[in-house]
Amino acid sequence: MDKKTIIGFILLVAVMMLWPYWNKLFYQQPPSPPPQTVAQDTTLQKQPIDTAVTPTAVPVRPDTLTAAIELPKPDKPEQLVRVENEDVIAIFSSYGGLLKSLELKKFKTQNGGDRIPVQLVGVGKADPFKASGALTLGRDDSINAVNFLPFEIEGGDINLKKSDSPKSLVFTYKGPDNSSIRKEYIINPSGYLFKMNLAIEKPRLLGFRDKITVGWMSPMVPTETDLGEDLGKFSAFYNMGVEVIEQSKFDNGKYNQINTGDTRWIANRSKYFTDVVIAQKEQADEVLVKAVQDNIANREGKQFQWRQFGLGMSFLLSGESFSNDFTIYAGPLDYFTLQKIGYELGRLLDMGWSVFRPFGIAILWVFLKLHSILFNYGLVIALFAVIIKVIFWPLTRKSTVAMMKMKELTPRMAEIKAKYKDDPAKMNAETMKLYREFGVNPFSSCLPMLIQLPIFWALFSVMKNTIELRHAPLAFWITDLSMKDPYYILPIIMGIFMFIQQKMTVTDPKQKMMVYMMPVIFTILFAGWPAGLVLYWTVFNIASVFEQMIIKRGMEAEKNTVF
């Protein structure tokens, strides 16, 4: 690794480390406007992935409920129905037919002393919008009465095995003059997808006026040890036409706004998990985003801001009945599963800059294929490093040969510098002539590393953000490849082999200090990065040492053959 390559790599590392801070600066919230006659809590920052459509924001208005109608308060005790399949445990309530809680059986939370299953609905104080569940109806506080109406339940507890057929759970409320609300949930035997078929008869008699809003008013909750990084990923998403919009930042601790435009889906996202509601028939024409900000402390007592989002999609009410079918995904941020559902839901997974995103997706695909054989992501990463080294062998060999030839030309180059020290133009011309004579390209040494920089950047995103690497162990003390090595053993091993590799490749005496400095600098940098990334670079450096030995022996053999 020569000086130019090292400088390029340092620049990449610097960008990777400073990117989160640059992102905050680039997307800094503009000052809040002065109070207006139309109530709006704050201006929410929009971060569009595409820019084809700009949603129109309008103030929230309580037009979903007829004020003259008072719905009866529940006169029956709440009944809970437990639904379980291979992957989730859900609790539904007879009040409003709401999804009361949702537990992911195969994922444990790290935020706390006990390892308990991740819950996406119904956790502690994560009910800032007084919804008491998910899949609500209505968008203002008064419509909550609908969500507490006593529904009749058709069916009981459900426990599905993988070989079972889907089963349905029906909640029905019958109001005055044949008005009614019917929610039918269709539960699959496995996975994180389920359906809700909604039918409302005479909705105006039930308090609705010109809109019916289906909402997911249960915010995401933190699940990771690194609380700050986890909370930093909390965002609300929705599509508007062909555009996918992320909304994450707001001022003054509160937000309440409606954006108008054709909308197929809404989503809530944390670092590793997401809730998505998809309208299968009619698209919504408005999206409601509600948010509040709270403080939460980690184990050391450090305070972080917890942005809690609730979303709703509103449908125009035109007639004496309303019906629509919804697909709900509540589970891990699994890229290929989300892409299979459609509607560009794979965009919910943070894979860094768009230019590197294809590399990240390709790497993730390779990881999954290798994992189906090796069953350990540590082995997958190690093998992937070897594969990359083999793929770039021709370029690396050419680069190494060029550096070795450059070393042989050092005395000749010193003579040229001494002879033409007062004539820089002539010195450069003679130097390039010398390169051509011996077939040396001074820039070929940095080509392999430059080509690999997108792979390294994409690896960084894959290691930090994909659910597959969460809690994935290597062996012994490394129990989570997505987190840093707790004892810094792997970064030290990486630094040692990087020193050996530098010692073998640096030929310029003026760069001798870099042989000692760069391994120390890289060890410090990598110490705080995911163990999986450090493992990749460690194996890559070990392979590079053996590669240099093979190339050197090959060149010596060629010389012996010639002479």
Image (cartoon, rainbow, N blue to C red):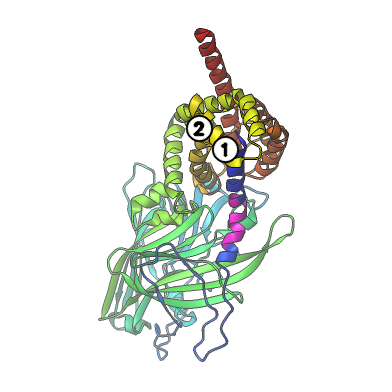
Q: Contact (CB < 8 A) between labels 2 and 1?
A: no
Say above or below: 87 vs 289: above
The residue under the point 27% across, 77% down is: 321
Q: Quadrant of the N terminus?
A: top right
- Residues drawn in magenta: 15-23
The residue under the point 39% across, 44% down is: 161
The image's mark for residue 426 is 1
Three-letter code, disc 2: Asn
Q: Residue furthest left?
A: 319
From the top left corner, tell me how far across and down residue 178 is, in percent. Answer: 28, 80
* 280 on left or right of 145: left
From the top left corner, tell me how far across and down residue 224 is, in percent. Answer: 61, 52
Front-most of residues 110 and 103: 110
Front-most of residues 224 and 180: 224
Q: Is residue 58 magenta?
A: no
Say above or below: 355 vs 408: below
The residue under the point 35% across, 80% down is: 211
| Secondary structure found at label 1 | helix
C-alpha separation, residue under disc 2 versus residue under disc 1: 19 Å
Front-most of residues 414 and 420: 420
From the top left corner, tell me how far across and down residue 55 is, in percent. Answer: 40, 74
Residue behind mark 2:
441
Q: Earlier in the sequence, mark 2 or mark 1?
A: 1
* 429 on left or right of 288: right
